Amino acid sequence: MQLKPFDKAIAESNLYPLTSTGINTLQVNVGRPCNQACRHCHVEAGPNRKEVMSKETMELCLDILRNSDIATVDITGGAPEMNPNFIWFVEECVKLGRHVMVRSNLTILTEPGYEEMPGFFAENLVEVIASLPYYMEQNTDSQRGKGVFQKSIAALKKLNALGYGIEGPGLILNLVFNPGGAFLPPSQKALEADYKREMQKRYGISFNKLFTITNLPVGRFLAYLNSSGNFEMYMGKLVASYNPSAATNVMCRNILSVGWDGTLYDCDFNQMLGLSINHGAPTHLKEFDLSSLSNRQIVTGIHCYGCTAGAGSSCGGATT
Amino acid sequence: MQTYYCPEDLSKFPTIGEGAPELWKKFSEWYGAVFAEGALTEREKALIALAVAHAVQCPYCIDAYTQTCLEKGSNKEQMTEAVHVAAAIRGGASLVHGVQMKNVIEKISM
C-alpha cells in the first residue's frame, strides 16, 4: 500500500518543516503501569508494565518548570495515579503555580488505596480528563474491559459529589471519547450534546467538555488494525481526510512530551514509537534548553495523519 | 471476476464519470448538497441513507453508510432500529398488497 508521506502532505499546505510555536504544556508520562489493558491503548499500558518515572526524573521536570513560564502540566500514563510519587509531584507542580491536568482512566479511583484520590484532586484544583468512550455500558466495556463502565460511573458520581463538572466550584471534569473501532470520531459538538443529555438522563452525571480523539495507528490499536485486516482501509481514510487547518493546529507544536526515563518527545505517540526529539534539539530533560526546544522541528511519520484527519485530533479533542 | 460485488469497487465509483463527466459533476454536487446539514442533521440523513441502503439492498451503500453513521455519532442500537424501519416498510409493502389479493378473491368467488 502506497501512502503519501506525511511531510509531503504538510509541504502542500506550506507547513513543512513543521515546527514548534512555543511550549505552553509539559506533558509528563509518569509510567506505563495501569489497572486496565484497553484494546485501543497506544501506550500498551497494563498491570505488568514496569516503566515508572523516578522521583529524580520528576525533580528534573520541576526544575524545568521553575526556569520557564510553561503554564500547564499534563500528567498521563498508564494510570498516572499508580506512580508512587504521583501525589508529591502534583503538589510540587501546584506549589509552582502551574495548572495541573491529570488523565485518569476513572476505574483506578475506585480501587483499594486510591479512594482519597478524588478529594486530593479537588483540594489541588486538578483538572481531571477522564476516558469514557461511550455513554453506554456495552460499547465502553468492549473497548476497555468488562466492568469498566460501572466503575467509571461510580467514579464520576464521586467527582460530581466533590463539585467536579458542575457549575460553581470551578473544578473541571472533561471526558474523552475515542471511536470503538476503525472509524473517525463524530463531530465533537454534536457528540458532546448527546453525552451531556444521556449522562444526565441515565446516570445523573454532569461534566464540562467532551474531547473527541482519533485513534492513531500506534500500539494496541495498530495491532488491532493489522489483525482485523483494517489497516489499509483505515490509513486510506486518514490520508483522504487530511485537513490543512487541523495540520496547522496539531498539538505537538505547543507541547513537550516527557517519557518515564526523562527522554523528550514531540508527543505521546512519538514516545510510544521511540521517536525522540531530533533535528538538533535536546533529547533529554538533563539537556533541556527552552529556546531550542521552542523552535524545534517536529519529528513526523505516517501516524501523524491521525491528528490531521477530519476535524483534527489532540489530547484536547478536535482542533478545528 | 470472482463475484459481482467487490468491496474495492466502491472506491472506483468516481470512474463512472469517465463516460459522462458533466453528468457526474452534477450528480456529485447534488449528492454533496443533499447530505449537508440542513433542516435535518448530517447524522439523521446518514441514518435515512442507511435504512434506504437496506431497502434497496445495495452492499456498497450499506458498507459506506454504516461507517458514516458511526462517524456521525450513531450507535448500533440506533442503526439497527433504522434497518428495522426499512424492513418494516418493505414487509408492510408486501403485506398491504394482500388487499389486492382479497379484492381478486372477492371478484371471482361466488
Image (cartoon, coloured by chain):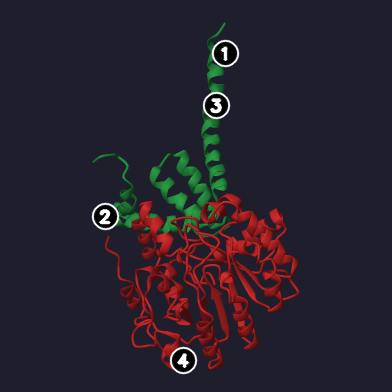
Chain colours: A red, B green
- Up-down relation of residue A36 to residue A242 (above or below): above
Q: Residue A49's spot in the image, x, y percent?
A: 47, 65
Q: Nearer the viewer, residue A253 or A97?
A: A97
Residue at (30% x, 54% y) in the render: B17
Residue at (26% x, 52% y) in the render: B19
The mark that comes first in sequence, 1 or 3, is 3
- Residue that numbered label 1 is attached to: B106
Residue type highlighted by circle 2: Glu
Q: Nearer the viewer, residue A175 or A79?
A: A79
Label 1 Cα neighbours within 10 Å, binned few <14 / some 14-19 / many ≥20: few
- Are labels 1 and 3 assigned to the same chain? yes
Q: Nearer the viewer, residue A159 or A186?
A: A159
- Residue that numbered label 2 is attached to: B18
The mark that comes first in sequence, 1 or 2, is 2
Chain of the residue on which disc 2 is drawn: B
- Residue that numbered label 4 is attached to: A290
The residues tagged by marks 1 and 2 sit, at their Cα atoms, a distance apart of: 54 Å
Res A76 quadrant in image: bottom right
State which quarter of the image contains the N terminus of chain A: bottom left
Residue type highlighted by circle 4: Leu
Label 2 Cα neighbours within 10 Å, binned few <14 / some 14-19 / many ≥20: few
Check contact, mark 2 vs mark 3: CB within 8 A.
no
Q: In this image, A290 relative to A103: left or right?
A: left
Check contact, mark 1 vs mark 3: CB within 8 A.
no
Q: Residue A193's spot in the image, x, y percent?
A: 63, 62
The residues tagged by marks 4 and 3 sit, at their Cα atoms, a distance apart of: 74 Å
Check contact, mark 4 vs mark 3: CB within 8 A.
no
SS state under label 2:
helix
